[in-house]
Amino acid sequence: MSRFGMNVKFTAKPGERDRLVDILLEGEDAMQAMEECELYIVNVSDTEPDVIWVTEVWSSPEAHRSSLDHQDTKASIARAMPLIAGVEPTIIRPVGGKGLRF
Amino acid sequence: MSRFGMNVKFTAKPGERDRLVDILLEGEDAMQAMEECELYIVNVSDTEPDVIWVTEVWSSPEAHRSSLDHQDTKASIARAMPLIAGVEPTIIRPVGGKGLRF
């Protein structure tokens, strides 16, 4: 089973980036406990003030998909939606490097 | 000192992706030993056969910059250049999540 990676570019509505960052980090405690979530990093841009990049690595595509079914995740998504102007996900597959166990 | 993150999209010349992946992973042993390199993941795309995404996190912008001055890095870059059709770096700043020590 190959890993599942995703870089997601969120564009927040003007002035809403920091509230959106807080919501995107709400699930952090749950993810720390979830072995199948290997990486979940929320990043901002110092040149694009409305942009957030989320870097995710999951043990499999199924692990990622089932995370979206959690009740808490659904609640966070519902709270985030009104703050979001755009979402551009890029699906990738990690093949090597430092920071994951290869 | 804030962390330095980067998502780099490489487009390889047709048929050269796997050779480019190998070169991008040459520095892995050195990076494993470098504390200031917190994350360096080479990813491929299952839908774009010439594309490679590299996810990097360094302890500071200076740590990243000085890594480019290493003799071995310079040699890898020189070998990679003829295989590369395009490079698009996106500079980001990690603010929280799982997989780094925040």
Image (cartoon, coloured by chain):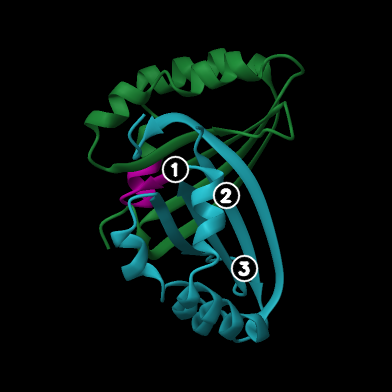
Chain colours: A green, B cyan
SS class of the residue under badge 2?
Answer: strand
Q: CA distance from mark 3 to mark 1?
A: 31 Å
The amino acid type found where label 3 is placed reads Glu
Residue A1 in sight here: no
- Per the image, the residue denoted by label 1 is B59
Q: Is residue B4 left or right of residue B32?
A: right
The residue shown at (49%, 61%) is B67
Task: Say the numbered circle drawn on residue B6.
Answer: 2
Q: Which residue is mark 3?
A: B48
What label sits on residue A64 in the rendered view?
none
Q: Quadrant of residue A2?
A: bottom left
Q: Are marks 3 and 2 on the same chain?
A: yes
Disc nearest the viewer among 2 and 1: 1
Q: Nearer the viewer, mark 3 or mark 2?
A: 2
Residue A59 magenta-drawn?
yes
Q: Position of residue A27 (x, y in %)?
A: 38, 22
Q: CA distance from mark 3 to mark 2?
A: 20 Å
Q: Chain of mark 1?
A: B
Q: How many callouts does the rendering have? A: 3
To which quarter of the image does residue B12 belong? bottom right
